[in-house]
Amino acid sequence: MGFYMGEGFLYVIFLILAVLSVFAQFNVTSTFKKFSKIQNSRGYTGADVARLLLEQNGITDVSVEPVSGSLTDHYDPSSKILRLSESVYANRSVAALGVAAHETGHAVQHATGYGPLTLRTNIAPACSVGSKLAIPMVFLGVVLSAFVNCLPLIYAGIILFSLVVFFQIVTLPVEFDASHRAMDMLTEYGFLNDSEAAGARKVLTAAALTYVAAAATSIINLLRLLAMVNGGSRRR
């Protein structure tokens, strides 16, 4: 009885986190849209700021390129390319400069050997596989366990998903640090004044909440998988 109440509790938490994740995504989109309407007083575009900040940090081997889509901005450490979305690359808004500086923060992390980023980059390929195969492996193992011993398959799926959870957790300090670096650089080098910097900070804070929600959701999903496997073992 106690176990099933615990499992039900996990589902309630999962639903709450799902709602919060949707809210976090809506919040970052609406906040970005709001501050995309406010132009920075110095007239820089996102691409301008990214290139100038790379130069200020002595990074000469990273290129800045446009990428299609909205909020698809990212830094690719394997190719050393900083890709900025259409709403950031040529945009002069406060939001665009905040996002461009954040992605530049990742390039600075890479150049300085920031530990969490190095770890995340190294485990990313395995996590990509795990995110696709882990849950199907566990479910298939649970279904087939009624006929044959599938514990190795189930445990392998759980291990893969645990790696995905670990990736999400490691992502948090990487993203928080990049945002911190971004705000320091934008203000130190005078790209934004105080009121503009406040707007950029709100955009980056909203984005950070999406990573927190993703990490929390992945942890609950792992606990749900463990509860499901444990429940199946008890019934057998």
Image (cartoon, rainbow, N blue to C red):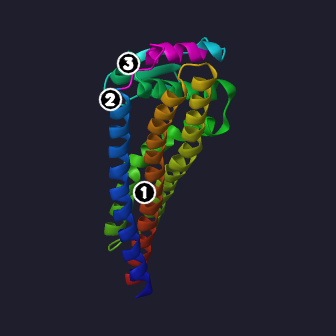
Q: Which amino acid does label 3 sit on?
A: Asn
As helix, strand or loop, the secondary structure at mark 1 comes to helix
Picture coordinates of residue 25, whole percent (x, y): 35, 45
- Residue 37 vs 41, above or below: the answer is below
Which residue is disc 2 drawn over?
70
Picture coordinates of residue 5, whole percent (x, y): 39, 82
> Which stretch appears magenta?
38-54
Which residue is disc 3 drawn over?
91
Q: Mark on residue 217?
A: 1
As helix, strand or loop, the secondary structure at mark 2 comes to loop
* Crowding at mark 3 (Cα within 10 Å: few <14, some 14-19, many 20+): many
Name the residue nearer the viewer: 217 or 87. Answer: 87
As helix, strand or loop, the secondary structure at mark 3 comes to loop
Q: Which amino acid does label 2 sit on?
A: Ser
Can residue 88 be seen here? The reply is yes
Q: Which amino acid does label 1 sit on?
A: Thr
